[in-house]
Amino acid sequence: MIRAAWSSRRLGLAAGGALLLAATAVLADLAFPPDLSRLEDSSTLVLAADGTLLRGFTTESGVWRLPADPDAVAPVYMKMLLAWEDRRFRGHPGIDPLAVGRAFGQLVRHRRIVSGASTITMQTARLLEPKERTLGAKLHQMWRALQLERRFTKDEILAHYLTLAPYGGNLEGIRAASLAWFGKEPRHLAPSEAALLVALPQSPESLRPDRYPERARAARDKVLAVMEERGVLSTDMVAEARLDPIPSLRRPMPFDAPHFAWRMTAANPEARIVRSTIDAEHQRALERLALAEQDLLDDGAGIAIMVVENESRRVLAYLGSSDFFDDSRHGQIDMIQAVRSPGSTLKPFIYGMAFDDLMIHPETVVADMPTRYGNYQPENFLKVYRGEVTVREALQHSLNIPAVTVLRHVGPRRLDARLSGVGARLEYGGAGEPGLPMALGGLGTTLQDLVALYAGLANGGTVSPLVMTTDDSAPPAPVALLGEAAAWYVTRILEDAPPPADYVDSRATRDHRRIAYKTGTSYGYRDAWAIGYDSRYTVGVWIGRPDGTPSPDRYGRATAAPVLFKVFLQLPDSGSPANPRRPIDATDLANRDLPPGLQRISAGEDAPGTIARSLTQPLLVSFPPDGAVVELREGEGGYAVLPLIADGGRKPLRWLVNGEPVEAPPHRRRADWRPDGEGFVQITVIDAEGTAARAQVLLK
């Protein structure tokens, strides 16, 4: 009885001691948790929509510490890492008793350390709290390893290790190492590359491949041999991997969309990872295009480009300048956000508001002749006037006088209110206020706001804020800028605008993709603009000198429009025009069939100084010009349609090719003719007064 009671007492004491020990351990764990501050001090990353890195920033201590995820690393690397560092990682509680026993036995037998017993969890603990390699430090790592295992899953511990492991210099983590040594994301690592990155953390400075390539090769090949021995890699895979070269230099970190990255980190200062809407492939292609086009510009001039997906309003490409590092072009200035004069790019919205108000129709006649409005006397860009033109022609050819005439009827303050109401930033400088010069660029706005407005045209006249990150909350409901009919009219007119004269491929591209576009040039040739859209994308291009000095003879149609079309060539074909469905209230009538009130719009009764006499220019076949050689292109059922365009003269116009009439609306200056073969042809246009103009061209 006494012995049984004593045994029970001993068991009770043992149980109590165990409980006390467990309680002490729990309290110690709570009182002294592991320090995770190094994980929190990771590099800020701006990612593309597919997760690839656009731009990263070092930590405050100057280290590249890129967060990593085991699922984003090549499986071959993960298998090699566990086989090399910790084969029983998935089964132990942070400390591997078998490895500890083996290491201790080797120490006793050989009186020196033969192999370590550190698990990946223990190594993670050491990386979180670096200490000198002593017995006390090892015991501390074991305790921390148990704490980490209590707090995190195995995959989370792997992620911490993959984020903190050193790879030479200021590189920490598998992602930074893979990008710096191989120029690729870790999910794409080959066996030879994975083997080198498994070896590097053992001695990151003495094995750096850019400084000690032979040591790095030997360490890599040792890992490959062990992987073959342990069945991770086949003999053939190892033999092939040994033939791969060791990287001889460290690559720079990705530096795509730098202006966008700075903007996103400034807007999200607490975020360590910004997930953007940028399409990495499109972004890099446009950066290469802009660099090539920059060489054709004047000294100090640069390019800015923005691409938006119409339906979602997601920004797919953001190029604030053509060369971020070119100080002579002020490349670090983000010209997408810079306030500049928009030139003629607001004209479509002037006409659109007039369409909404039923003031005009595309076939309404408006006078293009010198006109004074009080103290304001605008001029056409080339100081050439066409007399009476339709609204369609006035917008397609960006004539200034008709645009000012229509704005006078619409009202500058109404235009300002309408554009500001959908979020456009408009600045007039000093004590300036909305006035008739708005039609010709007499205000300031940004490329971003222009792209948002034109994306609204592509979406039936409704404008929404542009979306730049996937974390953006649901954007506000679209706001109507123009009615559907007005947006449809503007789109159809801009689709038929003459192509850039010096860009041969633009005509074929536009006929195929139906790009609606508008150009603009600010006063003194300081800014050249081209904004265009199809059913899927809206693209904005700005070209000029960021310091505001003029670039003589550089204007929208000749300078920015060719770049615009080249950008569209790099985007997937949308397959359809924007706003293809004609609204019920959109009509397609000749001028004579319009109600009397829509047949003509006057300059205004109180517009003193209006010159009433006709200043019609001589009739001319402007495209194709006399003596041109025209390359025929394939189309449905034969050759593609060739546009015939006339300037000057009085409408209606009649067209003949080799004496045969060409069907065309008589009140338009364009006829579409389909060639039937190669050779010389004579094109003739005859106006209402019987005046004829001719052009002989060679088709080949």
Image: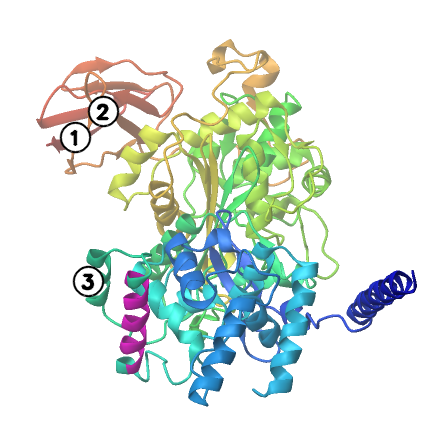
Q: Point out the residue furthest to the bottom here.
A: 111
Q: Residue 640 carries which label?
A: 2
Which element type, helix, strand or loop, lies under badge 3? helix
Which element type, helix, strand or loop, lies under badge 1? loop
The residue that label 1 is drawn on is: 632
* Cα gap from disc 3 to disc 2, whole angstroms: 57 Å
Task: Work out whether mark 3 precedes mark 2 in sequence or the reverse, and give the earlier one.
Answer: 3
Mark 2: few/some/many CA within 10 Å (<14, 14-19, 20+): some
Residue nearer the viewer, 611 or 599: 599
Q: Is residue 540 magenta?
A: no
The residue that label 3 is drawn on is: 239
Amino acid type of the residue tagged 3 in the rendering:
Ala
Residue at (48, 14) in percent of width and height: 588
Which element type, helix, strand or loop, lies under badge 2? loop
Main secondary structure found in the magenta portion: helix
Colour theme: rainbow
Amino acid type of the residue tagged 1 in the rendering:
Leu
Residue at (27, 27) in percent of width and height: 644
User: Image quadrant of residue 646?
Assistant: top left
Report the magenta residues as a range.
Answer: 215-228
Which of labels 1 and 3 is toward the front?
3
Position of the N terminus, as image quadrant, is bottom right
Q: Point out the residue furthest to the front here.
A: 1
Task: Work out whether mark 2 precedes mark 1 in sequence or the reverse, and give the earlier one.
Answer: 1
* Cα gap from disc 1 to disc 3, whole angstroms: 56 Å
